[in-house]
Amino acid sequence: MSHELGRLEDLPADYVAALRALNLVPLWPSLRAVLPPDKPVPATRATHWAYEALRPLLLKAGELTPIEKAERRVLVLANPGHGLEKMQASAAIYLGMQLLLPGEWAPSHRHTPNAVRMIVEGEGAYTTVDGEKLPMSRGDLILTPTGLWHEHGHDGRQPVVWLDVLDLPLVHYLEASYHLPGVRQPVHPGAAERRYARGGLLPTPYFQRAAKAYPMLRYPWAEARAALLALAGELGADEPVQITYANPETGAHAQNILGFYALMLRPGQTLTLPARSPACVFHLIEGGVTVQAGPDTFTLAEADTCCAPGYTPVTLGNRAGHGPAFVFLADETPLHCKLGVYEERR
Ligand code: 1HN
């Protein structure tokens, strides 16, 4: 049973002042705000960031601010529901579009928040993570897990842009976010994506595997796309065609806090994702889709990004009459599962 609780204004001012002087506050005036009835009231608002609109502003940043003055030249995709200055897409997710110009160098550093990059456009850039030089091509997913040294370089001729996805808002909220500058990393040969190139086939004996928490750092789009097409061939026409970016040694999510997925929509297919507790980000790699998040509907062109708050059903639709659409997703599922607050409502 829910009934009106006493308000702060109902209490004598001198009583409230006496409490405050001792760093005390009464719970009951705020109880309903922190425990709203039935479901949360998310600050996260369904929000769309159109690439066509932001791209010229990002390129302009390349003229206005040299890389030495930025370290990372990024426009943050901020959710107005949280206040733009908070630099949050959702409670736990940070999004930014990063520009690296030919010849530029974004120096080595490491930090506690986990990052991934989803490459949006351009060729010739690379990121070196934990001594592994990882080429960046459109649609590739590159991990930069917590604590690993990383730096970006660019040997190509065109601007390179990627989407950064970090769990920064959460790690910052936990007062666990910090940064260390580093020196240029020595690069060691070999790429884990080749060692782990086939699902279910692991390097043996065990010592040939990376005895690392994050054995594979780059997930080439060519592999993910081929996996989706193969999966589509196996599944019924109405079934969701979706893959999870996983740790090849453990099968768990690739990173600890945020989950990453790719999804294929067949021509004309619509797919309704049930309301779930985690917020979710959608980034269109290929094709044209609509994203209906509760009462809001967004029309995504290639390289567009949008987010939906938790506890909101989302319907995705492929607008194309022919040709599949490919969407990259990031969400807070691993975090919610580990904390025991994950929920799905149908
Ligand atoms: C970071 O380290 C990068 O390394 C990009 O490219 C964006 C946003 C907040 C904190 C660290 C990068 C970031 C970031």
Image: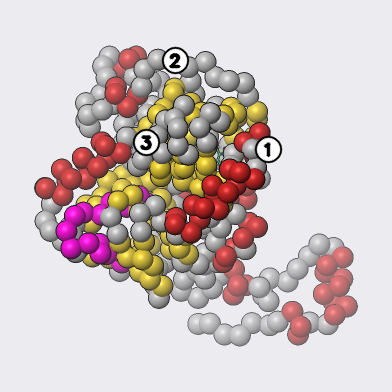
Circle 1: element type: helix
Q: Residue at x 30, y 51 (%)?
A: 286
Q: Residue at x 29, y 23 (%)?
A: 194
* Figure quadrant of residue 273: bottom left
Q: Residue at x 34, y 19 (%)?
A: 209
Q: Quadrant of the C terminus?
A: bottom left
Q: Which residue is mark 1?
A: 69
Q: Amino acid at mark 3?
A: Ser
Q: Main secondary structure of the magenta part?
A: strand
Mark-to-mark CA distance, 3 and 1? 26 Å
Mark-to-mark CA distance, 1 and 2? 29 Å
Q: Nearer the viewer, residue 315 or 96?
A: 96
Circle 3: element type: loop
Q: Residue at x 44, y 55 (%)?
A: 51
Q: Amino acid at mark 1?
A: Lys
Q: Amino acid at mark 2?
A: His
Give left or right: position of 312 versus 315.
Answer: right
Q: Which residues are magenta?
A: 314-329
Residue 188, disc: 2
Residue 344 in picture, x, y percent from top left: 35, 62
**Earlier residue among tags 3 and 1:** 1
**Earlier residue among tags 1 and 2:** 1
- Callout 1 touching callout 2 (CB < 8 Å): no
